[in-house]
Image: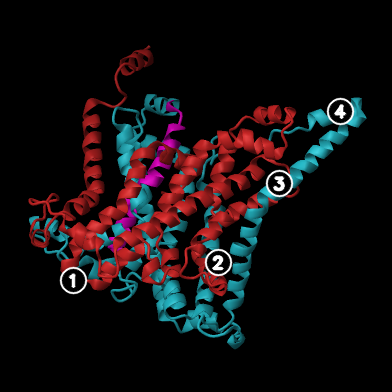
Amino acid sequence: MTATTAEAARRPGPRAPRLTGAVRITVLVAVLAVVLYPLLWVLGSSLKSPTELASNISVWPTDVTWANYTEGWNFSESLSFGRFFLNSTLIALATVVANAASCLVTAYAFARLRFRGRGVWFSVMIATLLLPGHVLVIPQYVLFESFGWVDSPLPLIVPKLLATEAFFVFLMVQFMRGIPRDLDDAARIDGCSPFGVFRYVILPLSRPALVTTAIFSFIWTWNDFFTQLVYLPSPDSYTVPIGLRLFIDSGGQTSIGPMLAMSVLSLAPVFLFFLAFQRFLVQGINTTGLKG
Amino acid sequence: MAVSTAPPPGRARTSVPARRKPADARRRAEGRAAHVFLTPWLLGLLAITAAPMLLSLYLSFTNFDVLSDWDQISWVGLDNYERMFTQDPVFWKSVGVTLTFALVAVPLKLAAALGVAMLLNRERRGTGLFRALFYLPSLLGGSVALALVWRAIFSRDGSFNAFLDIFGITGQPWVNDPDWALETLMVLAIWQFGAPMVIFLAGLKQVPTELYEAAEVDGAGPLRRFWHITLPMLSPVIFFNLVLETINGFQGFTSAYVVSDGTGGPVGATMLYTLHLYTQGFTEFKMGYASALAWVFLLAIGAITALFFSTGRFWVHYADGDGR
């Protein structure tokens, strides 16, 4: 009897008392402020003049100036961030297409086709997922060097054409397992070969997985530093991350403004992707545990 | 995978023997199609993964540097490995720095992720927005830009010191102080707690609310409910996040490179293992030695992963025998 009245008393309202609700919101907002501070700071500071950068510690500038952006964009007489952005964009787009296409066909074979040793090959694929990239970078460098590919985007793109991003293969296999097999069977009865099933059933229905793959491919490639540092040694082939590094070399307080301005520009595409595809991103992590 | 077409052929076999043929033909067609669809991946496995691994193993026993010709390579046996363990103080320094980084940053990052996930667990207005904003650093944090921002915020004249100044505290030149440089990198790593947080949130949704209600009726307070329900029920997800974040933690590179300008400084304080590997291979061109470093790295990560999986059965609790 007491239990039921207690339950009845608890049911209508939220389980936690109102006070903890307020505490909860306060804590969340405080954490959020700390989390967003660096982002707001870089945005605000990129609009400050050099004198204000040194003196004004508030996030937002009193006088907004765009000088940092023009100065940073034209880094030096021979180097412009226009070039770096173009290089980054081309490499990122090529990677998106390469990953999406190669991982889709690989995932189709693992998710839908029966062949000898499928279980073993699938385990091999999962094992490559855990293989740290740094372990392979030296022999790969030696390999691509012997092809004469160093200082071109090829070492960054060709491996993606060969479905080496096991994360995306795994993501797509997981997704395809959710597509009803009845559709395959129906297509087969209508005379479709395995290629036809791929073309008319799997490909159109895999669009959400393709979008997730495309977004993560773009963001990872855009943010990638290690491989671009290794394979793109000459300034003409620099991408945005490699170009940003120049600001450290030049050092000094005067270059901080332009450095922050170019940092903001380099973060902008990822941020826009985040705004547009937030739901896909969160879903992507949930299905595979992908890191951002 | 579980869906099988075995029953139809079975039926065909008993009633109409001739029907076996199309099923076999279909199976062969599928096998052939699989070869076609798997060709890119197999090529990649062979050329981009397997062959380089073997090449790297071979190189680790040589004095190879990329500047000399192939015919000048000589076999040096275990020299590289011996040098690593006995004559390379930077190796031991980098092992210490990497272990410290992973052992401190990963648990704190997961604790932050779990804490915020629990605050966000109940569906309320604005939960989605909070979740998205907390996740944002995970997308941006690995970039050179954010490492530069960190360098600026935690420099002597940075805004972190300006903030401390308000409370009358004289700050440090954090990123240039050997005692604090690694800590600033840890803060940058912890700042990206959003990705494991999203995974924790998905896990928390799976915990049946009846368990909490029953515990509450039995008089269990919030702490006991957390300890006896949330943690065990969440242990598969904690395990998953722990393995993933630890492996990622060992592979940190960008922030250390940018903050120290590629030197691993000040005084080796940010010399992560990957940075040592990169420096040996690509600025000193000691690629044989760097290959040996890479193999030790691979074995260490393998051993740590194996350790996780072998201890996991003592503390990971699968409610339905089928966790993630």
Q: CA distance from mark 4 to mark 2?
A: 51 Å
Task: Give the label, 4 or 2, closer to the camera.
Answer: 4
Residue drawn at 12 percent across, 59 percent down:
A53
Q: What numbered label is drawn on residue B12? A: 4
Q: What color does chain B have in the rendering? A: cyan
Q: Label 4 lies in what chain?
A: B
State which tag comes first along the sequence, 4 or 2.
Answer: 4
Q: Label 2 lies in what chain?
A: B
Q: Is residue B75 magenta?
A: no
User: Marks 4 and 1: same chain?
Assistant: no
| Chain identifier, colour red | A
User: Marks 4 and 2: same chain?
Assistant: yes
Which percent across, then down, holds residue B208? Answer: 46, 28
From the viewer's side, name the closer residue of A241 and B9. Answer: A241
Q: What numbered label is drawn on residue B34? A: 3
Q: Give the magenta-colored segment's residue range.
A: B183-209
Q: For the residue labelled by badge 1, is the local secondary structure a helix, a strand or a loop? A: loop
